[in-house]
Image: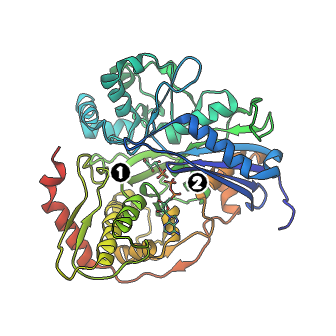
């Protein structure tokens, strides 16, 4: 490996299953060192923020001596999670994560109380799902009032880590737009919804503009980053990946991780009253319309494990249909649903059930793609396939067969961490983060041409979803 040309920067991805850290040469985008440490998620979908901090320290430690030379750091984190802190900055309770649907009743009431789905979409860009932070806060108030009363600061996962690094309560518009208390119309915290849920704005972090620094790394024992290292604002993990790809408007991304997401950058502020598309802000000055499923790689891996199969051991055919809603679902909005399997015959093979699970997971995302893309998007633009699942052949082939579009799998694998690194590099170099990532050529990788769309499978999935509606909505 050639000696790094530019200053070194650190990008962090604190996602659902693990923390990944990359040390990156700001001039070339070359990854000089990497580290990764796992997280624990409880069956209720809660995680201890203190464990995220320890995972961050471990991941940085694994990066070795390069990390001591970092000029700046930035954190991309799983969106929406409710982190509640006491007066000393310690978690009051474990964080409620994006894939916890316990706040579905609070979600329904909040949507109705603030004028219904259209009013929410126009004001907040999104009709909130039970993933959104505001619904979780309301759940906490109703179910654990003593814990809610002890809260002196509310943070998102990436803000929590930014604050542990720098001592500053700061966030960015991208992650703020997934809370349900930051209005995309006003680009500010919304006093009415905060009043309704009894949350003082003083408990929330400042929303910084892109290109601003949150602060510098404060002295801390056992943290390998040098004191005084610049700390960028950070952002939500999907916004970070969009930055990491240097994404231009209209180009669709499909991310296969714990969550499945499909999104594009748009210059128009989204406001989808059906609630399928969340109208997030991106980490710069544009928008990031996005649809998210709760059941993606973990649902497929669970079905493979049930049958004792490798995740690649798929078989075609068989006419079986799986709606893999093991955790309830957000897209479509079916928080009380569980998984269903129909079309089982004596000759159905386990590999066919596994393939049908991939199909069910990918179908939900592709069904939202047309709503995510605005009229500026090219209809045949290739899908950029990212996330842990993008490493798998069965995932890639399922996306090709059900989308009928070309697919590009970027060679750079850790796009969230790279996007965070681009934010850090932008601070040091005084440039735009997306321009930095474009120079790094992060979106390049093998290209797979379009194949004929499997209309039979798509029609069968749509019909099963419609026929099972009553079952899927039962509490
Ligand atoms: N080689 C592979 N082939 C297919 N899937 C993979 C492979 N390696 C990892 N995965 C999937 O990637 C998922 C983790 O993806 P990742 O994007 O890192 O998740 P998250 O960001 O949500 O923590 C795992 O659940 C696993 O199923
Ligand atoms: O809720 C969403 C997007 O709205 C999720 O995409 C989370 O941001 C979690 O991401 P991963 O940990 O699966 O990357």
Taking 275 as reference, is 4 left or right?
Answer: right
Point out the residue furthest to the right here.
Answer: 3
Who's the residue at 75% across and 30% down the image? 220
Q: Which quadrant: the C terminus?
A: top left
SS for callout 1: loop
Q: Can you tell which quarter of the image residue 263 is in?
A: bottom left
What element does badge 2 sit on?
helix
Look at the picture and state if 260 lies above or below 39: below
Give the residue at mark 1: 277
Relative height, residue 38 to residue 400 (above, below) = above
Please state which of residues 211 and 323 is positioned toward the viewer in this rendering. Answer: 323
All told, the count of numbered labels is: 2
Q: Position of residue 390 (x, y in %)?
A: 50, 68
Can residue 97 be seen? Answer: yes
Residue 416: mark: 2
When asked about the image quadrant of residue 227, the answer is top right
Q: Is residue 366 above or below residue 313?
A: above
If the image is split into quadrants, where does the N terminus sit? Answer: bottom right
Whole-angstrom CA distance, mark 1 to mark 2, is 21 Å
């Amino acid at each position: 490996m050639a000696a790094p040309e530019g200053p070194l920067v650190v990008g962090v991805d604190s996602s659902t299953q693990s923390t990944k850290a990359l040390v990156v040469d700001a001039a070339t985008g070359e990854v000089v060192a990497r580290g990764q440490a796992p997280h624990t998620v409880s069956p209720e979908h809660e995680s201890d923020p203190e464990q995220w901090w320890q995972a961050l320290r471990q991941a940085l430690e694994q990066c070795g001596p390069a990390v001591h030379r970092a000029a700046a750091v930035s954190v991309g984190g799983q969106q929406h999670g409710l982190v509640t802190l006491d007066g000393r900055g310690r978690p009051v309770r474990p964080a409620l994560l994006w894939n916890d649907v316990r706040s579905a009743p609070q979600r329904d009431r909040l949507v109705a109380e603030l004028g219904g789905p259209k009013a929410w979409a126009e004001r907040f860009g999104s009709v909130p799902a039970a993933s959104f932070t505001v619904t979780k806060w309301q759940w906490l108030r109703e179910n654990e009032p003593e814990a809610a009363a002890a809260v002196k600061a509310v943070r998102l996962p990436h803000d929590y880590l930014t604050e542990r690094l720098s001592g500053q309560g700061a966030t960015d518009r991208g992650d703020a737009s997934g809370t349900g208390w930051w209005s995309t119309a006003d680009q500010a915290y919304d006093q009415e919804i905060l009043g309704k849920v009894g949350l003082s704005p003083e408990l929330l972090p400042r929303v910084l503009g892109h290109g601003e620094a949150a602060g510098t790394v404060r002295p801390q024992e056992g943290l390998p980053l040098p004191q005084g290292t610049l700390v960028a604002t950070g952002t939500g993990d999907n916004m970070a990946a969009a930055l990491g790809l240097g994404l231009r408007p209209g180009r669709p991304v499909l991310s296969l991780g714990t969550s499945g997401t499909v999104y594009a950058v748009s210059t128009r502020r989204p406001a989808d009253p059906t609630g399928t598309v969340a109208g997030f802000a991106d980490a710069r000055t544009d928008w990031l319309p996005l649809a998210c499923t709760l059941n993606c790689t973990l649902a497929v891996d669970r079905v493979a494990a049930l049958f004792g199969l490798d995740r690649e051991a798929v078989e075609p055919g068989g006419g079986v249909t799986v709606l893999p809603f093991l955790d309830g679902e957000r897209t479509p909005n079916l928080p009380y649903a569980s998984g269903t399997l129909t079309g089982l015959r004596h000759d159905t093979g386990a590999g066919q059930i596994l393939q049908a699970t991939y199909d069910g997971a990918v179908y939900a995302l592709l069904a939202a793609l047309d709503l995510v893309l605005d009229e500026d998007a090219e209809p045949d633009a290739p899908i950029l396939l990212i996330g842990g699942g993008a490493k798998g052949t069965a995932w890639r082939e399922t996306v090709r067969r059900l989308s009928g579009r070309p697919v590009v799998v970027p060679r750079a694998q850790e796009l969230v961490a790279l996007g965070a690194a681009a934010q850090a590099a932008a601070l040091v170099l005084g440039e735009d983060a997306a321009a930095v990532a474009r120079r790094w050529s992060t979106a390049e990788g093998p290209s797979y041409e379009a194949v004929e769309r499997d209309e039979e499978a798509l029609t069968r999935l749509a019909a099963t979803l419609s026929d099972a509606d009553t079952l899927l909505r039962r509490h």
